Amino acid sequence: MSTQDSNAVQEFLGINLPHFSAMSQARMNALGEGIRSDVTPTSLVSFSSSGIVALIGPLPSALQVVEGLDEISTCVVIATEGGKVGQTETRDINGRTVAIIFGRPTSIRGYLGNFEISLSREEGDIAVAKSMGLADDAIDIVLDLSREPLLTQDVLPVGYFAPRGDNDALLIACESISDLKGQFQKPRYVLYNADICAHGARGIKGCRRCLDVCPADALSSLGEKISVETHLCHGLGACTSSCPTGALSYSYPNRADSLNQLRRVIASFREQTTTAPSILFFGGDEGPTELSAAVNHLPDEVIPWKIEELGSVGPEIWLSCLAYGAKAVMMLQTLDTPSSVLAEMSKQIKQMSVLISALGQPSHAIGLIALDEHFEANCRQSLDRPNNEEGRFASYGGMEEKRAVFRAAIDHLIDEAASVPEKIPLPNGTPFGEVLIDSNKCTLCMGCVAVCPAGALIDNKERPCLSFIEWNCVQCGLCENTCPEKAITLNPRLLADSNARMARRVLNEEEPFKCVDCGKPFTTQSMVSRMEEKLSGHRMFSGDGIRRLRLCEDCRVKDMFKDGG
């Protein structure tokens, strides 16, 4: 490997990877092969800050900090103690006039260059920026000196600092604030396709996995869809890996680029060494720093692969690495990995471990790994299985659609497995499975078909018939929540036979019920029976009136108005 190529690998990883042995040199060559092409660019998210800083906290502490922010021309103090809410005054600090407003903020929203802070009082809320005549009615930067910050999410907005009484953190915050004036950009990490979102439909609540896992509160519900506030998004990625349909996808790098790179890395290492590697994903701000300290304990057969954030690669990527010929896939847990991301990854690892165990692979072939005294031993454990020299390795790539990648990886792993059960039970929450229908309750109203975001449930325009394609089902629960008769339950599982997974099968069907007057088919017998049961005591359907339920819409209208009735 040339010095230029070696430098490119080291720059990509952010660590100095040893490459003295033949195996470690093969690892460097494989990494060079993996990064030889550029990734697809993404759009950018812009911030504009004029450098106006709001300090929140007790007045003496805030004024003391203002003295140290001598490079900041405009500081506003929101004094949480000592005055009437909304009361204002000014102080001269080192030749600068500092505006002060008293009150404890009840609301902080926004991001660098666009924070809105509100104070609450009986006469009405006070918008701090507008009340104090700040440019664009916005605050650019917030330094929250409270022991218990007003914003509590795991990952704070860009431009919001909360040192929590830690002097070292306060010094770092003040140094950062002085550089936050001007125009700034970051990648747009997440893309959203509302057409396949399973969050809701027709007023029914469905999937909310992305909302539950986002540590930055960048996602919000808009009824049946979600909203992504790109300025709040830090690209932690767990929303995309948890999304069952692929409505949320990571864009930097995108799924297709990641697959192509990882396929080349694994194939190159195997070709050079006839040995299957393990892949170690690491990322985040602290990932390279923490891994650098342990890099000499990293076995040569373990290939570190830097990603933007730990949650940015999900189960379809993990399974693809195994299909490409990796022995194991490990995700490096670092100190700055948010707890919500770790919880979601642990859940997904459990789901995929059950799946690969059923296919004859060790459950530890996918897992989280920590930089502790067991780091090297755990890395070596991931390699503790025979090389599959006779095996056939997957070669697919360039696919962006999540379910298509899942299917390609699963089909390959099943094809290469020595024995596979016909049906693989999976933990709740796994995005594969079947819909079970209680035909004694189902009236074939087709409400479930109307809300299914993935085309798993299908009606028949010719006759009352509910069909199902199992592979399309993402187990989002919309159909179960919609069913008025509570006739639907979900069963997470995987059918080993790909054709059976893709086949359309009938879940429930009936002969159509025909209008007793004109003979036109218009509903089902079960629907008529259910309506007769529910409306038998209603005055409109008393006596012979119950017969109207057996009439089609046109005949029912005629019957209601005949003889002036």
Image: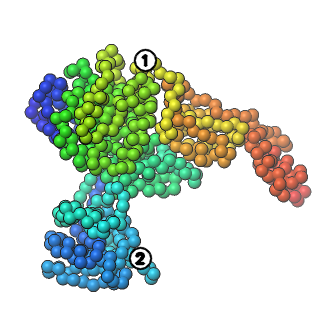
Q: Which residue is mark 1?
A: 418
- Density class for disc 1 (Cα within 10 Å; few <14, some 14-19, many ≥20) is few
Q: Residue at x 84, y 58 (%)?
A: 539
Element marked by disc 1: loop
Q: Nearer the viewer, residue 239 or 85?
A: 85
Q: Is residue 520 above or below residue 168?
A: above
Residue 40 seen:
no
Q: Which residue is mark 2?
A: 120
Residue 564, quarter of the rendered image: bottom right
Q: Nearer the viewer, residue 537 or 345?
A: 345
Q: Quadrant of the N terminus?
A: top left
Q: Residue at x 82, y 56 (%)?
A: 538
**Residue 51 picture location, percent across and down:** 22, 68
**Residue 498 picture location, percent across and down:** 49, 25
Q: Residue at x 32, y 22 (%)?
A: 385
**Residue 129 picture location, percent across and down:** 32, 75
The amino acid sitting under disc 2 is Ser
**Residue 364 picture location, percent across and down:** 36, 31
The amino acid sitting under disc 1 is Ala
Q: Residue at x 39, y 41 (%)?
A: 346
Residue 178, quarter of the rendered image: bottom left
Q: Nearer the viewer, residue 307 or 22?
A: 22
Q: Is residue 447 above or below residue 358?
A: below
Give the Cα distance between marks 2 and 1.
67 Å
Residue 433 seen:
yes
Element marked by disc 2: loop
